Image (cartoon, grey):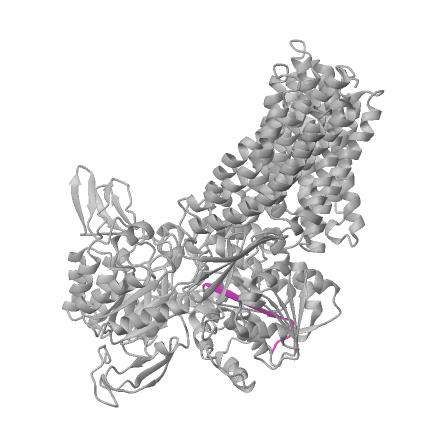
Amino acid sequence: MGRKSYLVAILGYGFFCQIGQAVLFRELFTIFQGNELSFGIILFTWLFWSGLGSRFSAKRIHRLPPYGYLSPALLTTLLLPLTIWGIRILRGLLPIPQGAQVSLLDIGWISFLFMGPLCFLLGGLFIRIAKAWRLEEQRLDTHTGGKAYFGESVGTAIGGLGFSLLLVRIADSSQIVTFAGLLFAGTLLYTFLPGASRNLLFLFCFLSVGAFILARHIDQATHALLWKLYAPEYQLLRYKSSRYGVLAIAQRELQLSVYQNSHLLFTMASPEASSSGFEEQAALVFAHFSLLQHKAPQTVLLIGGGLRGTLRGILSHPVQKVQYVELDPDLINLALPHVPEGTKMTLQDPRVELLIGDGRLHLRTTSHTFDLVILDIPDPTTAALNRFFTYEFFSLVSNRLNPGGVLALRTSSTPELRLGAMANKNATLYHTLREVFPQVLAVGEHTLYLFASSSPGNITSEPRVLIHRFQERGISEGEFSPYLFEQVLLEGPLLRTNWILNRHGRAPLSLHTPPERGPLILPPLEEQRMDPALQEPLQKRYFINSDVRPIGYFHSVHVWSSLTRSDHSPLLALLLYVQPQWLLPFLGISLLITLILRRFAYRNPRLPMGWAIRFSVFTTGLSTMSMQVALLFAFQTTYGVVYEMVGLIIALFMIGLALGTFLTETYIRKKDALGTLALLQLLLGSFAGIIGLGLLKITEIPQFLGFAVLTVLSGVLNGADFPVAIACLASLEGTVDRAIGTVYGIELGGACAGCLVAGVLIAPIFGLDACFWLASIANLTAFVIVLLTKGGGALHG
Amino acid sequence: MDRRQFLKTCAGLCGGASLLPFLGIENSAEAQTVKRGLLGIRNSPWFRTSARNTLTCTLCPKECTLSSGQRGGCRVRENRQGKGVTLTYGNPCLVQIDPVERIPFFHVLPASRTLSIATAGCPLECMFCEVWDMALIRPEDIHAYEMPPAEVIRFAQSAKARAISYAFGEPAAFFEFMLDTAILARKAGLLNLLHTSGYISPPALQELIPYLDAVNFDLKSIDPSFYRKYCGAPDMGPILDNLRWLVQARVHVEITHIVIPTLNDDPSSLQRLVQWIRTELGASIPLHFARFYPLYKLTNLPPTPVTVLENAYSIARTAGLQYVYLAKITGHRTEHTYCPRCGNSVISRVGFMVGKIHLNKGRCQFCQQAIPGRWEP
C-alpha cells in the first residue's frame, strides 16, 4: 500500500459523503414538504452527528485498531440506501393525518433518528482513515491530517459536481447512492487489498452492475410503497426526481394532484372530466381577476401556474401574446400526458411562448415589456421562492411593465388576518409592493390577491367595472361567472383587509401582536389612503422584504409552524425579539474566559492556548457557514434557482478548501503555527467585514466570476485554517490523531451553529450583510483571543 | 370674549355633550371600542360544583372539570375563585354585515342582510377549521369590540339588517351573550339565525330554541370516530339528538356537511348521512355539501374533487332529499333552489348573489308548491 491508495480512499470518502448528503437532503426535504427551516435543521443534524462521530473517534483513536476503518466504512455504503428507503416508508407510517404538515418537532426527531447512525459513522471515518494513512507513511506529524482534509475536499467537490451536473439527470436516488456506495467500497478495496485478484475485481464489477439495476426497481417499489402507506386512496401515476425536487402526480376520482417534495402544488381535472372549469375554478378566478384589472391587456407574462388552469383563463381574453415561464421542465413533461385536452391546447396556442427557466432571471434579461405580469407561485417559504416577493423583484417588474401595466400575485391568507404571523407575512408583501407601486389593492380572505400598478385608473375594486370589462371582451362564461366578483369584492371584508394591511407594521409592537381591527364602520378605500395614521413610519426592517433581508420567508415559515400539529410558532416569534447587539455578551464572555484562563495558567499552562485554538476553529466553522449561507442566498437572488450552478458554487467552495489546505501544508512547516492561526482569523474577519460593510454588494455582483472568486476565497481561508489548527493542537497536547479528530469535530460544530443561526435568524431577520458581520466579529474576536494567549509561546507545525 | 365668558361657554358645551346619550344621540366612538384582550366576564349558570373549589362546566358535552383559575378546553370559560364565568360576554371579535346566503341560509329571507357576530373560543378543534385564527384562540390574544347585546341590536338596526347571525365561530362558546342578544333581537323584530356544530348540551339548546328562527347545522359526519380523530372531541355527544329537537321544535333547519377528501367523502359515508337525514328529519331539510379547500392543519390535502361533490348530490337526491346544494363551487347549477314538484328554479343564485326569485309567500310561482323556509320576517 502507498500514499496514492489512501488518497484514493479519502477521495472516495469525500465523494461518498457529498453524494450521500445531497441525496439524503433531497429525501428528507421531500418528507418535510420543503421549507427553508427544514433545510436548516437537516443540515444542522448532519453536521451535529458528523461532529459527534468525529469527536468520539478522536477520543478513542488510540484504542481503535489502526486499519479497522474498513468495516464501518463498508457499513455506511449499506446504511445510506437503507436510510433513504427507511425515510420513505416512515412517512407513510407516521401518525400524521394525510394532508397535514410535518411539524418542527417531527422534522427534528426524524432527522436526528435517521441521520444519526450514518453521519456518526461518517464523521468518525475521517479520523480513522487519516490515522491509517499517517501510520502507513510512518509519520508522527500532522501532515497526513492536512492531506486527508485536502483529499476529502477534492472528493467532495467531485461529488458535488458529479451529482449536480450528471447524476441527478440520469439516475434516480437509489441508483445514485448505490453508485456512490460502490465507488467508495471500490476505493476501500483498492486501498485495503491492492493485490486483489482479477477474479475478485471482476466479481465486484459484476455485482456493481447488478446492484445498479436492482436499485432502480427498489426505488420504484419504495416510492410506490410510500404512496400506498401515505395516501392509499390516491393512485400514483408517475413520479420523477427532477433537479428541483421529487415530483409526483396522483389521481383520485377525476382529479389530478401534483406534488413537489410532498407539497401539494396544484390540482387539475383529469382528461376524463367532462368539464374542468369547476375543478380549476381557483385558477380561473385568479386569471380572470388579474386580466380584468387591466383595461385592455395585450401582452402578458405568466410565471408558474400554467398547468393548473391559469393559462387557460388568460387565453380566454383577447390577448395577443403570453410568455409562460416554468422553472422545471420535468413538471411539464410529467404532467402533460395527463392534463385535460383544453390545457394541452393552451400550450399549443400560437399566442403562447413557453419558456423554461427562472422567471426572475427571464425578467432581468428579456427586452420585452408587458401589460400584465402574473405571479402564480407558492408562498415564499424558501429563499428561492422569496426572491419573487422582494422590493428588488417588484422594481424589476415595474421596469418591465408598459404604462398602466399591472402586477398580480396571490398568497395564502385568513379572513381579517387575525393571526399575527399571517398579518406579518401579508403586510410585508403589501408594504413591499407599496414601496414600488403607488396603487396597490388587496382582496380576498383565504387567498389574498394583490394587484399593483404605477398608474391610476386600471386597478379597481368595483365588481361592476370588472363585470363590464368581462362582458365587453365577449368571453364566454362557461363554468366561470363574472358575478363571482360581487362575492369576492364584498365591501366589508375588502375595506377591513386593506385597512389592516395599511396600518400593520407601523406601530412599534406590530411585529409581536395581532393587527388592530379598526372601527366597526370603515371609511372607503380612497379615504383610507388619506388616513393620518398612515403617516406613521413603517418598521421597514421587519415589513419590507428584500434580497438582502429576506424577512418574507421567515414570516412564511412562522405561519407554517402555527399550522402544524405541534405548534412552535411562539418559539419562532421569540426570534423576532432578538437584537444584533445580543451577540456581544457571548463574545464578551469568550474574552472573559480567555482572561480567566490566562490568569490561572500557572495551574495548567496548556489550558488558555487550548481554549484559544478550539475557539478559533469553532468560529472558522461558524463564520464560513454563515458566509456560505449568505453567498448562496445572494447567488440565487441574482441567478435564480439554477440547480447546476448551485452545485457548482458548492464545488468551488470545496476546491477553495482544498487549495487553502494545500497552501498552508507547505507554509506551516517552517512558521509559527499559532501566529499563522491568528493571522488567518484576522484575514477571515477582514474578508467578511469588507463584504459586511457593503463595500462588496453581493447581490449586485453581475458576473458569475465574482461569486466564484468570493466562494473560492472563503474556502481557501477556511481550508487554510484546518491544518494550522491541527498543528497547533497537536503541538500543544502531543497527540496527532486526537488533534485531527478534535479540530474536525469542533469545526463541524461551528458550521452547525453557523448554519442554524445564519439560515434561520441572521439572514432573514437582519439581512445577508449581517451574516458577514457575524462572521467578521466572531473571527476578529478569535484573533484577539489567540493573541492574548500567544504570549505563552509559539507553536510549530 | 373674556376669560369668564370663555369658561362659561366651555362648561356649557361639556354639559350639553354629557346629555347626548339621554337625548338618543349616540356617541359612536364608545359603541365601537375595540381592544386586544378584551374580556367580557360574566357569571354563568352553566357550571355545577363537583368538588371543593372545583366546578364542572355543563355547557358542552366535554363537561370540563376546572379547578380554581383553570380554563375549559374552549378557552373562554373559567373557574374564577370558585365562580364559573364566561369570558365572552359582549366582546365579539367578528361583527360584520353579510348576505344571509353566506351563513349559509338558502331558505331564509333571500337577498337580505344579516349582522353576524362571533367571539373567540370553540369546544371543538377541527383540523379543517376555517376560522381557526379566531375560534381556536384565547380571548386575550385577539382584538374584540365592546358590544353588549343592546348595542348589537342597535347596530343591526342602523345597518338595516333583518337578522342577527351567530355564526363563523361556534356560538356555544358565547352562549350567554348569544341568549341575551337573541331575546332582545326577538323583541326588536329581528330574526335569530344560528350556525353551529351542535356540540352543546341539550338543556342549553332547549333554553335557546324559543328564540331561534333558523339554524344551519354543521354536521361534519355521522360517524363518532370522525369527531374523535379530526375534531378534538371524544365523540359526537348529543349532536344528532340536538338536530332532532330543533326539527321537532319547528325551527327551520338547514344542514351543512363539509366533504373532505379521503376523510369523509366515500359513498358509503355519504349514503349513511343522507339516509339518516331523510329518515330522522325528513326529505325537506335543505342540505349543503360544502367543498373542502386546503387550510389550517390540512393544507396539503387537495380540494374536494367536483365529481365527488356531484356524486354526493346524486346520492342525496336519490335518497329523496328535495333541496340539495353544492357550496363553494360558484356558478354550479346546484346553487339554485328548484321546486321539487315542477322542477323550475324558484331562486337563482351565483354564490351569495341572488338573482331571480319566483316565490310567492313561500310558494312556487309556477305550481304553488310550498317551499320550506322562513320567507317572511
| Of B236 and A519, the residue lying toward us | B236
Left/right placement of residue A644 relative to residue A96 reads right
Q: Is residue A357 above or below residue A655?
A: below
User: Is A410 part of what is drawn in magenta?
Assistant: no
Residue B371, horizontal then vertical, whole percent = 22, 81
User: Furthest residue to the top?
Assistant: A603
Residue A147 appears in the rendering: yes
Residue A276, horizontal then vertical, whole percent = 48, 73
Choose top left, top right, bottom left or bottom right for residue A39.
Answer: top right
Number of numbered discs visible in the structure rendering: 0
Name the residue: 20% across, 38% down.
Answer: B53
Residue A82, horizontal then vertical, whole percent = 53, 37
User: Is A450 part of what is drawn in magenta?
Assistant: yes
Residue A614 appears in the rendering: no
Left/right placement of residue B163 relative to residue A414 reads left
Q: Quadrant of the C terminus of chain A?
A: top right
Q: Quadrant of the N terminus of chain A?
A: top right
Choose top left, top right, bottom left or bottom right for residue A151.
Answer: top right
Name the residue: 62% across, 37% down.
Answer: A207
Residue A223, horizontal then vertical, whole percent = 51, 49
User: Furthest residue to the bottom?
Assistant: B366
Span shown in magenta: A446-459
Q: Is residue A37 above or below residue A396?
A: above
